[in-house]
Image (cartoon, rainbow, N blue to C red):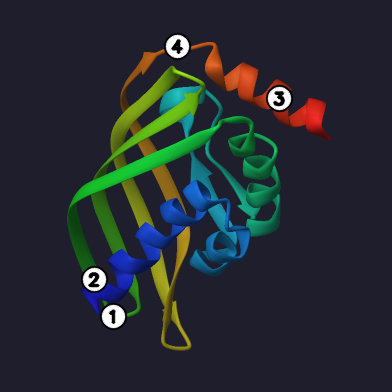
Amino acid sequence: MKDQIIATVTALFSGADERDWAKVKNAFAENVELDYSSMTGNPASIASSADIIAAWRGFLPGFDRTHHQLADFYVMQNGTVALVHYYGKADHFIGDELWIVEGTYDTELIETDGKWIITKHKLNLIKQDGNMDLPAKAAARVSEQG
């Protein structure tokens, strides 16, 4: 069971790195509580998986590549609900410039029809490093391609 839970979490991040939006959608419930408030200052909100993917599609492809590394998974499962706490580091590249986000995550999943899907996803920011202008540059690159 724990292997399936961790596989869903890792699929979310590898799907984002691969720009495989079907893989990302497959990891998400229809609606997800997304909380990046520790980084953005915006409060947690519930959004449809389609809206989250649309937002990520409008941002991540602006980087030449991204690479997420996850470690130290701690899974607490109670029946059909699981909470996963883990460390994550995300490297975002444009040319030889780099923006790094490091933190821990708290992700909640539920089991439905024998499959684990993400219902809540929270980043607990530890630090950002590198070129802090790259997120805006990436978003601009995507809108220019549009």
User: Mark 3 highlights which residue?
Assistant: 141
Query: Is 129 left, or right, of 93 in this rendering?
Result: left
Q: Amino acid at mark 4?
A: Asn
Q: Residue at x 31, y 70 (%)?
A: 5
- Report how far apart the C-alphas of labels 1 and 2 lie in the structure: 6 Å
User: Mark 2 highlights which residue?
Assistant: 77
- Mark 3 secondary-structure assignment: helix
- Report how far apart the C-alphas of labels 2 and 3 lie in the structure: 41 Å
Q: Earlier in the sequence, mark 1 or mark 4?
A: 1
Q: Are marks 1 and 2 in contact (CB under 8 Å)?
A: yes
Of residues 20 and 44, the one drawn nearer to the viewer in this rendering: 20
Q: Residue 79's mark?
A: 1
Q: Amino acid at mark 2?
A: Gln
Which residue extends farthest bottom? 113
Mark 1: give few (<14), some (14-19) or many (20+) Cα within 10 Å: few
- Report how far apart the C-alphas of labels 2 and 4 lie in the structure: 38 Å
- Report how far apart the C-alphas of labels 1 and 3 lie in the structure: 44 Å
Foreground mark, 1 or 3? 3
Q: Are marks 1 and 3 in contact (CB under 8 Å)?
A: no
Q: Earlier in the sequence, mark 3 or mark 4?
A: 4
Placement of 66 over or under 39, stated as above or below = below
Q: Earlier in the sequence, mark 2 or mark 4?
A: 2
The quadrant holding residue 135 is top right
Residue 112: x and y in percent read 47, 82
Q: Earlier in the sequence, mark 2 or mark 3?
A: 2
User: Mark 4 highlights which residue?
Assistant: 131
- Mark 1 secondary-structure assignment: loop
Foreground mark, 2 or 3? 3
The quadrant holding residue 32 is bottom right
